[in-house]
Amino acid sequence: MLKGPFAEAAMPSFVTRPQRQLDYRCFSSAIPIVIDNGGFNFRIGWAGESDPRVTFRNLVQRPRHRATAIVSNAGETVTIVGDHDPALMKYFDCTRSSYRSAFDNNVVYQFEIMEYVLDYGFERLGAEGPQVDHPILITECICNPVSSRSKMAELLFEIYGVPCIAFGVDAAFSYKMNQLHGICDEDGLAICSGFSTSHVVPFAKGEPVWEACCRTNVGGYHVTDNLKQLISLKYPYHSSSISWEKAEDLKLEHCHVASDYAAELQLFQKGAKEAEEKTRCWQLPWIPPTQEEMPSVEEIARKEAVKEKQGQRLRDMAAAKKSIRISELENELRVMEDLLLQLEDVDEDEAFSILSTTTFNSRQELESAIHKVTQSLRKAKGESCESEEKTDSSLAEKYPLIDVPDDILSPEQLKEKRKQVFLKTTSEGRLRAKQKRYEEELWREKQNQQDEEKRLENPELYLEELRAKYRELCEKVEQRKRLKTNGYHSNGNGNTSGGVGRGERLNAAQKERMRLLTTAAFDRGKGEDTFGARDEDWQLYKLISRDNDDENDSFEEDHAELTRIATRLQDIDPTFVAKSDMVPIQGITSELPWFRPRTIEDFQISIGIERFRCPEILFQPNMVGIDQAGLDEMAGVSLRRLTCADDDVKNKICSSILVLGGSSLFPGLDSRLEAGIRQIRPYLSPLRVVRALDPVLDAWRGAAAYAASLQFSTQTFSIQDYYDKGESGLKNYQIKYSL
């Protein structure tokens, strides 16, 4: 709902809201409006009726309009009162907003939010304007602070023009309602466990004794929040599906109060059959994965034909590209050779004028370009590059000081010679690496060609040999990984065991290195530590390093060969699935584990011990970090505060203990509360604990019956009294419940 008393034009028509009443004008201005302003629900209706007309959650949310074609004012903030339909999520952006309440531990302190709630309640009741010309009876918490009552009176008088108001406690109205039906006596004890707080109110001669009241900041909200946290910790991968509203539904449907909390805990700790019977399962939405059928022989043949056709097309394109490249290089080489022939028959001046029309600056640059193009042409044709002899001569011309003795060189020439030696060594290393890469490419191409010819001769035999080689390499790589990293070995039953010594899980090369290290410090068994005194001793580290490098190189070669075979199998065998911990296939790295597909059992949430552990905080608030008394202890504290009452009066009060409030709906709460209070009371003293007729609606019904009485007009606080007495008049204001 938008700000303003009855703004409705800006709200979309599709919002699900309580039905608006149409008989507002049929009630005279003397009939009071009854409001049960609870921490969970807001109820409003007419005095004398049996049920409230409008009920909604006492919450406010302020999302933004989404950018849709239906909503033209996208991005503007709207105010929604109550719990709305989930269908609104596609029209409003609720990701950056949350529910807000006007209450703080059952006391109204956010009156801006309270104004939204009252606007919405009066509008749904049928009021057509901001003025409400009816007396109002509104409920409040026990011992409500004067500042909160004063702000509420100011809101009702100044904004809505209410002629008079009356404040009453919801627990007292509920107790008087049950007293009318004979559920409880005139003297008794009301234990009210609400949404955010719990109260104990003693009654004497039909009136509450406020100085003996007791309060604890634990209620139904804390039970629901505790249940949500426990389930989220138990099933962290379903935490997004466990909302507060779903936890509330689970609480109302499955939770109960244990008669003996310790015995119930032991029952679940032992894993008895009774514990399994008390466990409930909640099934989350689950869509079974689609079962992929294995392709038929015809489908595999068709895919192979398509793949072969595509491969032939790529080979033809590569051959055409190669022929074009060869022709271009031949033309370029022919042009440069003709240019070189022209330069041989002319003098230097004419040669310079000829070169000025080209991109070459000298004859040497032209010859170097001819050499490069020749090498490129041979490489394109697949011929071996005979570049070593020319490289030797070119290096000799480029580095002339390398072969000159040092004794005939000056210091500057010696520095230049060392520089030329370094450059020559680097150039030769690059040439050797380039030649090695070229040879490896030729070897791979030749091996691929041989594999393809072998596959075409006998595809089934080739595939079987390839699979066998893949299995062999997998076992070899896995064995090396196991020996190198974790040191686990098989115990003969297919299981692994880690309880072995280091020497048992080392291979031969590692054992040899350990032997060398352990014996190197002793000289020929004499026990003298002379290692390192001779230069030959340090050759040991070179030997160990070389063995380790050889082992690493062998491991890398095996892993590379395994990757190549896995890629080849994936290309020719549609049914092949590579081991994820061996070879990365299709961009999936070996570090990421492959989990099994989720089943319907993975989307089941079991609620066992949580069923009675969460409501237990009503009796043991310290379980959630609240250092206050429980319900049974609160009853004992309230009885001790009745200093003016004797034992007979206390016995009469304990004979009529009424349990009310939304949290009193837990099964087993009455018997647990009676057992706890009986431990406090003297032996064989009378005790009776009963539940209210309707623990949730009795507060509003009692207030409606109270407002319909003839003496109600004498219990109100008028607007004139507000102007004359102000906050001091509200401080001393108190109604009488036994009219």
Image: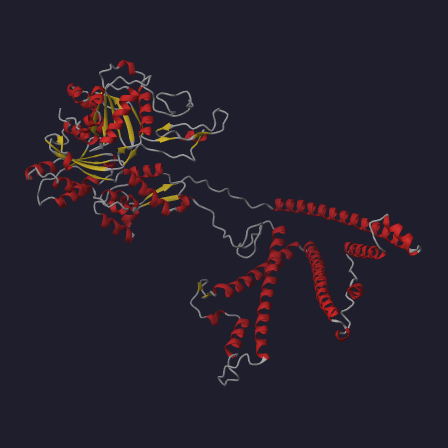
Residue 573: percent from left, percent from top: 61, 51
**Residue at x-position 29% and y-position 16%:** 24
In this rendering, the answer to whether 143 lies above or below 406 is: above
Q: Is residue 680 left or right of residue 492?
A: left
Outermost residue toward the front in this view: 411
Farthest residue, direction bottom: 526
Residue 528 to residue 445: above or below? below
One can see residue 677 in this view: yes
Residue 254 visible in the shown view: no
- Quadrant placement of the C terminus: top left
Between 702 and 638, which is closer to the camera in this rendering? 638
Which percent across, then down, holds residue 616?
25, 44
Q: Nearer the viewer, residue 652 or 580?
A: 652
The x, y position of residue 442, in whole percent, is 72, 58
**Left or right: residue 442 compared with residue 256:** right
Which of 415 and 123 lies nearest the eye of the viewer? 415
Number of callouts: 0
In this picture the colour scheme is: secondary structure
* Quadrant in which the N terminus is drawn: top left
Q: Is residue 652 left or right of residue 526?
A: left
Left or right: 51 as drawn, with respect to 6: left
Where residue 236 appears, x then y in whole percent?
A: 40, 46
Vertical placement of residue 441 versus 193, above or below = below
Q: Quadrant of residue 144?
A: top left
